[in-house]
Structure formats: C-alpha cells, structure tokens
Amino acid sequence: MVAVRADDAIAEEGTAAFLQRVPQLAVVPAEPVPWADVLLVVADEVTEDTLWLMRRMSGEAPNKGMRIVLVASAISEPQLVRAVGYGLVGVVLRPYATFSHVVRAITTARAGHAPIPSSMVRTLVDEMRVMRQEASGGGTRPLFDAREIDVLTLLAEGCSTAEIAVRLSYSERTVKNIIHGLVSRSGMRNRTHAVAYALTSGLI
C-alpha cells in the first residue's frame, strides 16, 4: 500500500490518481496517518515543513516499517541525513521523475531496497563519517559481525534479499532476520543507515 503527500492538494490528488492506475499498487488516504508500506512525498522544494511531515508521519504511522520515497527538485546534504533518519529510503529528482521512475522507486522501496542516487549515497556516507568522528572523538568501533558485514556488502552493491540469499547460501528469511537484527541492535533507522555506517567505518 502507498500513501501520497504533496505540497498542494491538486498535486496530491493527481499523483494518487496516477498511482491508482498501477495494478500492483493499492493507494490509501494519507490522513489520518495511514497503514502504508510506502509514503510518497512530492515537494517542489524540500523545506522544514517537508522534513517535519516525514518525521510526523514516520513517528505516528501504525506500520513502523513504513518507508518514505521523496520526489523533489533537490535536497541538501543536511536535509538528506535528517530525512534518512526519519525513514527516507528513496529519492527521485524532478528532472528524472517520469511516471515509470516514480512507480519503480515505490516498488523498489516496498521490496526493501534503497533507490537513492549513488551521488546522494556518497553524500550521506560522507556526512555520517563526520558525525561519527565528532561523536567518538575520531575513533571507530565496528558494530557488525562477519556475517552481517557480508550481507551489508551485498546490500551496498544493490542486491535484493533473494539475491543475497543465493550468493551466501542462506534462506531469504535468514537474510531478512540478519538485516532486521543488525538494524535494531545498532540503533540505525533502516538498512540505508546501516550500509552508510559500514562504509564510513571501512567495514565494506
């Protein structure tokens, strides 16, 4: 299920109407806070109101695993770091925001992947590296064991949980349990956060 929030009511209704044409997507109202797998946020400009919306919807959502996909003209480095902390897993920039791109980002996010452009992932990694160094005085302390690092490495390469299961000779359920366990134990918001942390730590 997917819910839509946009800067204005016309854009919100129009986007929801387009998504309702996609057979594999069930569109639900965004208010009250929906039980949705994915929240699509459409913003011409990312503002404090946009970030507050993500934070509120993520915090109040009945489905604590709800993922957020953003369609926007741009997002700054500090905003990206904050938004990932609120549950953002996917970004589609307006110049590339065709209907098919948006649908692909939603379905990819729903499947547990993180469709964030590689340049933004690097930005996120760099920002998190600075944050970690400031918090730890420059030291590092790995949070993940060898099996978790193997999974994170393949996630960073863009593999799905099914592909990871095949590559590591695990069941898909085992892979999902590993991901859930490492995210929960490390205090990360989602797998995107965990992959970024592992990259900044030099673990993968």
Image (cartoon, rainbow, N blue to C red):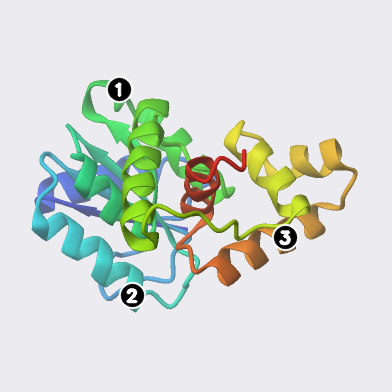
Q: Whole-Å distance between the Cαs marked 2 and 1? A: 29 Å
Residue at 57% x, 63% y: name it: 183
First in residue order: circle 2 vs circle 1: 2
Query: In front of the other: label 1 or label 3?
Result: 3
Percent of width and height locating residue 24: 55, 45
Residue at 11% x, 47% y: name it: 10
- Looking at the image, which is closer to me, 158 or 203? 203
SS type, badge 3: helix
Q: Count the labels in the image.
A: 3
In the drawing, what numbered circle is on residue 178?
Answer: 3
Look at the numbered discs 2 and 3 and tell me whether their residues touch, using CB distance below 8 Å.
no
- Looking at the image, which is closer to me, 187 or 25? 187
First in residue order: circle 2 vs circle 3: 2
Residue at 76% x, 51% y: name it: 146
Q: Is residue 86 visible?
A: no
Left or right: residue 63 compared with residue 88: right
Quadrant of the image containing the C terminus:
top right
Give the residue pinned by disc 1: 96
Q: Residues within 10 Å of mark 3 (few under 14, many from 20)?
A: some
- Residue type at numbered disc 2: Gly
- Residue type at numbered disc 3: Ile
| Location of residue 47 with respect to 45 vertically, above or below | below
- Looking at the image, which is closer to me, 178 or 70? 178
| Location of residue 55 with respect to 163 vertically, above or below | below
Q: Is residue 91 visible?
A: yes
In the drawing, what numbered circle is on residue 59?
Answer: 2
Percent of width and height locating residue 156: 58, 36
First in residue order: circle 1 vs circle 3: 1
The quadrant holding residue 93 is: top left
Q: Residues within 10 Å of mark 2 (few under 14, many from 20)?
A: some
In the drawing, what numbered circle is on residue 182?
Answer: none
Residue at 31% x, 73% y: name it: 33
